[in-house]
Amino acid sequence: MAEKNEVVVQEEKKEVAAHNNKVTDYSLGIFGTSDNFVMAMQMAKALSASTIVPAIYQNNSSNCLIAIEQAQRMKVSPMMVMQNLYPIQGKPCWSAQFLIAQVNNSGNYDIELQYDEKQKNGKPFSCQCWTMKAGRRIDGMVVDMDMADAEGWTKKNGSKWKTMPQLMLRYRAASFFARLNCPELTMGLYTKEEIIDGDFKEYPLETMQEQVEKEISNGANSEDFESAAVEPEFMEDEE
């Protein structure tokens, strides 16, 4: 009887050791198994106790868990996600800078995002993001101040469209480019600027595609690419 009990104890010890030495398989995602979830929750609690993470994650393990899940899906550091994922008006959103960095670092394109910018009456008026892939120019949607006025972006209290139009045109052009050409990088989330501007509805993707196809048919993508024309320049003022 004593020998039998000794065998049972040894087997239990082996099971405990095997469990303690188990490597969590995050290829299944943090919600893939109970072990994954437990480990993710432990990490979330540890991060929420830090005073270095943004305030929205401090003492909030649930927010940290969401950041960890996003980081796991994107194969980036949870801290990188925490520094660039904002909850605004109850909606999670990226900073535009982070989205631009994601596109530039994705390896999908031959060069980083470029910006074709135009002026009107001496002020920034329009912007279009583009890049190159396998010798072919990839265009995003043209964004201009008429669109910003029509959509009401310039009419928001404290709107940066009034004080920093060039920056906002770049941010919005980059957001449209990513949403149209590489939506897997946005993870279905808007940018902080889009949420602040009140863009809660889905953008008309068909309209965006139609515009790009129209530009392609007009020869927009048939121009020879000159490597020297990397830095964006403002064109001469239009009348």
Image (cartoon, rainbow, N blue to C red):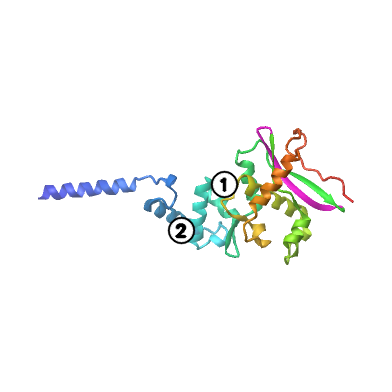
Three-letter code for the amino acid on which mark 2 is drawn:
Lys
Q: For mark 1, what is the residue?
A: 184
Q: Nearer the viewer, residue 137 or 185?
A: 137
Numbered mark located on residue 208 in the image: none
User: Seen in the image, is 144 located left or right of residue 27?
Assistant: right
Which residue: 20% across, 50% down? Answer: 9
Residue 76, given in percent of the width and then of the height, sits at 54, 46
Q: Badge 2, how many Cα within 10 Å: few under 14, some, many 20+? A: some
Residue 33 in the magenta stretch? The answer is no
Q: Secondary structure at mark 1?
A: helix
Q: Earlier in the sequence, mark 1 or mark 2?
A: 2
Determine the residue positioned at 48% across, 61% down: 62
Residue 155, compared with residue 109, is above or below; it is below
Q: Nearer the viewer, mark 1 or mark 2?
A: 1
Q: Are marks 1 and 2 in contact (CB under 8 Å)?
A: no
Point out the residue furthest to the right here: 239
Q: Which residues are magenta?
A: 122-135
Instruction: Name the residue that disc number 2 marks.
Output: 45
